[in-house]
Image (tube, rainbow, N blue to C red):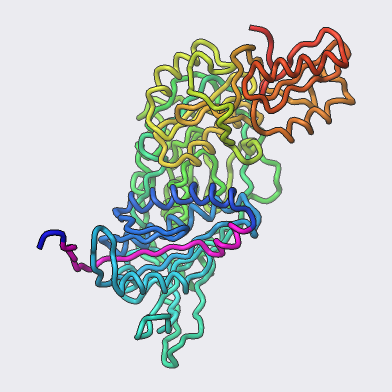
Amino acid sequence: MAGQTVLKRKIAAIFAADIAGYSRLVAEDEEETLRRLEAYREVVDDFIARAGGRIFNTAGDAVLAEFPSAVEAVRCAIDIQESLRTRNMAFPPSRQMSYRIGITIGDVVERDGDLLGDGVNIASRLEGLADVGGICISRTVHEQVANKLSVQFADMGAREVKNIPTPVHAFRVAMRREDGTYAPPQDQKVAKPGGARRLISAVAAVVAMMVAAGVGTALYLDHRDPPAAQRDAAKSAAEALARLSAAPAKQSPQSPAAASPSPAAATAAVEPSTSPQPAGSPSSAAAPEKFAPEAVPFVTERTRIALARDYVPAQDYKAFATTINGINAYVSGQPSEEAAKAAALEQCRQRVESVNGPRKCDLYAVGDSVVYPHSKPPLPPQPWVRHDPSTERAFSVAEMPLAHDAGKARLEANYKPGRRSKAIALGPNGQFFFGVGADLVEDVVRRNLEACGAQAGTACMIVALDDTFVVPVPTVMKATGFFHAASHSAIAVDAREEVARRLDASPSGWNAIAVGTGGHPGYGLNGDREETAIGGALADCSTRDNDCRVIAIGPFTVEGN
């Protein structure tokens, strides 16, 4: 009959996610919460799409999706929780934004793209049973995935849930804690007296390798200086895994090729260069750092997830090597420690050669200890990107600050036509890294800042994101370096602190600083244009000093063109 809605019944794996305490977060800071929700949803949507899922409904902070496979649904949920847990580490506990996720397999009815039925309702109830940042699955899902994923489950027994006539048998998935250790899934008191309590050991063969650096991702270097640094690591994930299982899973020895990411998983291309690898000082710590995947610099979030899944639980002998471009390789099950180190380095070198890259491979970890010989890449304070419509404008290679002609030529040839997501990190002496074709914006921003900081020996800044300058880039005057009020010799010593304070209090719009012969500053703050800020700074300076000149615009020191 014309106009009649077509109903289609099918079996599907249903995924339901909701942010814990979302109403409280909105009440405390609505704008910041909504901005972060948008960023977190990009992560969630990306993982769902890549796992073959389809989002069929959203409402506020909730996400409902269907998957053709229970294994892919659970694997996707773990990826999401691991990725968002890392992002939450940048925020205090009271402002962390964590999902609860529930998954079941059920009979559903499809109507105009939406799904209805008990399968959707049960997934939503399971989500309510999950821990904050955790995953809860039904028995039907557990039966499908228990021997296919190297994670553990706790039997929660049959649980009475709202508006479902029969108890739902639920299982909790073991998730990593904030410090990098695994939280052993604990049995809970169940609603049904006869509910079984048992911890099921489901550590299986190594999960299929996740693409490590995002296919199509590329990091390019203009030029570079010293040093680089050893990451602070959290608790040993290997020790935590041992707490999850009384006896470690037995693994067969792996060849270097089998245990390492493919060349395409590292970087798609590297800018040719003969510059030396940074020569940071070896760590002087008495005890080695414990390896923690979320602390590994230069690599993508997908590589970190793969390391947590495959490298951390692997038995010795094992090793992991990387370059500052994120090209990496790891091996496990080798006959000796020396064999593991040699195999990891060799696989890493082969990948570098396959993309004609000049980067030197360094051992980052041997066994469960960090052995990286360089220092920690310096990073700027968060947020790494602050959007301001009053200063943002279309990216132009000709206007790229501090860059030399050769560097601009590389940007024209590689960055400008590059696929999104892409970003440029700039150092104070004109060195810059850029990446193109990344899966996640946050990933390409972090990796470029780490690589640029390692080479510059100081924190860099993101100047361009996709096809937009995201900092005030001067054109009326010429940028000559980074502006630091506390150390700028043209400003009177007793005025530097005030300059820094007033700039910190003016994070938006165009800001300019002028000084006269006596070092007394003049301010042009929150201007709608570069010219407005310049004129305001000169006018203000002239009221308290002579021969005033502009020394800073936005984050840059400047001079006349």
Question: How far from the left and from the top, in percent, is residue 543?
Answer: 86, 15
Looking at the image, which is closer to me, 421 or 318? 421
Q: Please, which residue is most extreme toward the bottom here?
A: 193
**Residue 239 in view here:** no
Q: Is residue 136 visible?
A: yes
Relative to the observer, which residue lies in front, 284 or 262?
A: 262
Quadrant location of the C terminus in the rendered image: top right
Residue at (63%, 19%) from the top-left corner?
Answer: 530
- Determine the image quadrant of residue 496: top right
Residue drawn at x 67%, y 8% as measured from the top left: 560
Which stretch did the figure color magenta? 4-27
**Residue that appears at 87% across and 20% down:** 492
**Quadrant location of the N terminus?**
bottom left
> Outermost residue toward the left?
1
- Seen from this angle, which residue lies furthest front? 2
- Quick check: 324 left or right of 290? left
Left or right: 264 in relation to 227? left
Please check the rendered image and state whether residue 20 is part of the magenta-colored stretch, yes or no: yes
Q: Residue at x 65, y 32 (%)?
A: 508
- Of residue 135 and residue 338, the one placed in the foreground of this image is 135
| Residue 491 drawn at (x, y percent) | 83, 19
